[in-house]
Amino acid sequence: MLRAHLVEDVRRAEAAAMARLPDGALMQRAAAGLAAAVLDLLGSAYGSRVLLLVGPGDNGGDALWAGARLAGRGVAVEALLLADRVHEAGLAALVAAGGRATRDLDDLHDAPDLLVDGIVGIGGRPGLRAEAVAALEAYVDVPVVAVDVPSGVDVDTGRLDGPHVRAALTVTFGTHKVAHLVDPASLAVGALHLVDLDLDELGEPAVEALQPDDVRALLPRPGLDAQKYTRGVVGVRAGSDTYPGAALLAVSGANAGLVGMVRYVGPEHVADTVRTAHPEVVGAGRVQAWVVGPGGGDDAATMLAEASQDGVPVVVDADALAHVDEAGADWILTPHAGELAAMLGVERDAVEAAPLRHAREASGRWGCTVLLKGHHTLVAAPDGRVRVTTTGVPWLATAGAGDVLSGVVGALLAAGLEPYDAASVGSWLHGAAATQAAAGGPLTASRVAVHVPQVVRETLAGLG
Ligand SMILES: NC(=O)C1=CN([C@@H]2O[C@H](COP(=O)(O)OP(=O)(O)OC[C@H]3O[C@@H](n4cnc5c(N)ncnc54)[C@H](OP(=O)(O)O)[C@@H]3O)[C@@H](O)[C@H]2O)[C@@H](O)CC1
Ligand SMILES: Nc1ncnc2c1ncn2[C@@H]1O[C@H](COP(=O)(O)OP(=O)(O)O)[C@@H](O)[C@H]1O
Ligand SMILES: [K+]
C-alpha cells in the first residue's frame, strides 16, 4: 500500500527519529536521496547546470545540502536565495563545494538544465511570493525537481490556491503527503520518488493508494469447489430508448469474468442487444448486488426503487444518482465531479477544487462508500478512510468509461468484497485496463472492458 500522511503526523515521526539519530542526520539522508535523483535525471554531472531556488526553511536546507553534493560531483550549481535568512549550514556547504549563491535573479549565469524547488516544503502555506514567481517565470521551459512537495500546493488537502510549482519530478522524504496523490495538486507533482528515512510512529495514513500486491490479495478468485452462484451474481439495470449503449458498456464491465453470472433488466430491445453482444447474460432473478443508472434517463428513478427493494448492495451511477435519497450502508455511489456537485448543491468548480473534502462529505452525508471519478479517482468510506486510484491514463476521459467502471465495481461487490474494497479495486483494475488498452494512444470505453481479464491475469501472476 502506498500511504500518505498529514503534516502533523510527519512532524511527530520526524521528531521521534531525530531524538534517536545524530544532529542533522535526517536532512543528510534527504539531501543524499535528492542529489541522487537529480543526478539520475541529469544523466551526467560534468557540464550540467542546476539552479536551486531556496526558501527560508529546512526545505531550502535540503536543496542547499543536495546542491553541495552535486557541486562536489562536478555539476555547476547556483542558488537563488529567496528569503532574508536561509539554512546557514547548507549555504556554507554549498559555497565550500564550489557552488555560488545570489539574491539577484539578474546575477545568474546561463540558463540551467534543471531547477530544484526548495522554496517551501511541509511548512509552506499555499501560494508563492512574487520573487519565487519571478524566478519560475524566468525559466518556464526548464524542468523542475520539487523538494518534498511542489511549493505553493496545500500539502494536507491537495488544493491549489494561488501560484505553485509544476514539477517534472518530486522527491519526497519519509512518507508520501496528501498533495502527492490528491487532485488538483497531484497534477503538479510529476514523477514521484520516495526517499526512505526509516520513520516509524507515522500512525494511520490520511489517504492511501492500492498497489498491485494489495489488489492481488483482495481479488476474488474461485475456489476448487466453486459454482456460479457461490461466485456471486451481479444484476445490471441500465440503458433506455435514448441511451441503449450505456447498458452494453455497464454489462461489459460486469461480464469481465469476476462473478459467476450477470443478469440484465431493462427495455426489451436493449436486452436483445445486450444478449447478442454477451450471450452469457441472463434476465431478472436473484442477485448479490445491483448496478443501477448508466443511460437510465427517465427510467432511472424506477430502476433505483426496484433495485433497492432486494436489500442487496447497490452501485448507483449516472442518472440514478439524482434519485438517491437514503442510501444503504453497503451501497456505492459513483459520481463524477458534476454529478457530485448536483447531489451536494454546490458548483462543479468547488468539487474540482477540493475533491477530497467533497468525497468525504458525501460519504458522511449518505453513510456509504463514495467513488468520485477524476484524474485520480477517490474512494471515501463513511469511517473516514480514503483510497486514491493512481492507475489509468487521461485517454480514459472518454464517453462511456464510467459505465464500464460501474459494471466492474458491481461485479466485485456481488463477488463478496466490502464496498470500500470493491470500489477501490474496481477503480484500480479499470485504470490499469485503460492503460493497457490505450498502449500510449487513444482508446474507447468498450476496449477498457475487454482488457480487464488480462489485467486480472497479470495481477494474479504478480506481473502488475
Ligand atoms: N519532516 C521530515 O521528516 C523531514 C523534513 N525535511 C525537510 O524539511 C522541510 C520542512 O521544513 P520547515 O519546517 O523548515 O518548513 P519549510 O517548508 O521549509 O518552510 C517553512 C518556512 O517558509 C515560510 N513560508 C511559508 N509559506 C511560504 C510561502 N508560501 N512562500 C514563502 N515562504 C513561506 C515560513 O516562514 P514565515 O513566512 O512564516 O516567516 C516558514 O518559516 C520538509 O518539507 C523537508 O523538505 C528533511 O530535511 C528531513 C526530514
Ligand atoms: N484526466 C484523467 N485521467 C485519467 N482518468 C480520467 C481522467 N478524467 C476522467 N478519467 C476517468 O474516466 C472515466 C470517465 O467516466 P465518466 O465521467 O463517468 O464518463 P461517462 O459518464 O461518459 O461514462 C472515469 O473512470 C474517470 O476516473
Ligand atoms: K518544495
Image (cartoon, rainbow, N blue to C red):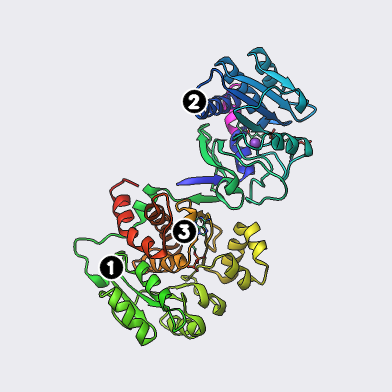
- Which amino acid, by three-letter code, is at mark 2? Gly
Q: Is residue 373 above or below residue 43?
A: below
> Quarter containing ligand 3?
top right
Q: Is residue 155 above or below residue 145?
A: below
Residue under label 2, please give it: 43
- Which amino acid, by three-letter code, is at mark 3? Leu
Query: Which span of residues is magenta-colored?
Result: 16-23
* Label 2 vs 3, first from the N-terminus: 2
Q: Position of residue 407 (x, y in %)?
A: 39, 69
**Residue 268, magenta (yes or no):** no
- Of residue 168 and residue 206, the one placed in the foreground of this image is 168
Q: Is residue 285 visible?
A: no
Q: Position of residue 146 (x, y in %)?
A: 61, 36
Q: Position of residue 128 (x, y in %)?
A: 74, 41
Residue located 54% across and 68% down the image: 335
Q: Is residue 111 visible?
A: yes
Residue under label 1, please give it: 231
* Label 1 vs 2, first from the N-terminus: 2
